[in-house]
């Protein structure tokens, strides 16, 4: 059986994984818990999105580019411009999870 390396053993536990049992305990005691920290949205998925997934004509759903699709970032720039927020597509990073952007920000602080 392969052994876990010293580096692997010394790696800290994920903070998000530490929250899961706390959230479960809070829910059990009647507290309303929003699982945004572990990828559970607090809003229902729009029906048009569910329908699009059901009817997709693809064999592979690959990961998107790490910075997000350029066309979407350009549309976001147009959206923000309505509020006098001037950004370029290079100013925007699209991500599906919160942990990654926080780690990127921590590298620059």
Image (cartoon, rainbow, N blue to C red):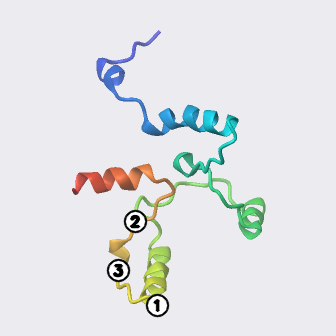
Quick one: label 3 or label 2, which is nearer the N terminus?
A: 3
Q: Earlier in the sequence, mark 1 or mark 2?
A: 1
Quadrant location, the C terminus: bottom left
Which residue is the site of mark 3? 88
Instruction: In the rendered structure, find residue 82 and report the number of the disc placed on it.
Output: 1
Which secondary structure, mark 3? Answer: loop
Residue annotated with mark 2: 93
Identify the residue at image location x=71%, y=66%: 49
Q: For this view, does 78 lie left or right of residue 48?
A: left
| Horizontal relation, residue 26 to residue 17: left or right | right
| Residue drawn where x is 36% and y is 29% of the image | 12
View extreme (left): residue? 109
* Label 1, label 2: how far apart the Cα atoms are: 19 Å
Task: Give neighbour class at mark 1: few <14, some 14-19, many 20+ (Cα, 10 Å).
Answer: few
Helix, strand or loop at label 2? It is loop
- Quadrant of the image occupied by residue 10: top left
Horizontal side, residue 10 vs residue 39: left or right = left
């Amino acid at each position: 059986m392969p052994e876990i390396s010293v580096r692997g053993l010394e790696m800290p536990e994920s903070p998000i994984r530490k929250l899961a049992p706390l959230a479960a305990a809070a829910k059990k005691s009647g507290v309303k818990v929003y699982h945004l920290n572990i990828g559970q949205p607090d809003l229902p998925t729009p029906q048009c999105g569910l329908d699009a997934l059901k009817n997709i004509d693809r064999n592979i759903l690959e990961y998107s580019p790490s910075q997000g699709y350029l066309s979407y970032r350009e549309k976001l720039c147009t959206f923000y411009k309505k509020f006098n927020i001037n950004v370029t597509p290079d100013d925007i990073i699209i991500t599906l999870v919160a942990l990654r952007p926080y780690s990127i920000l921590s590298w620059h602080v």
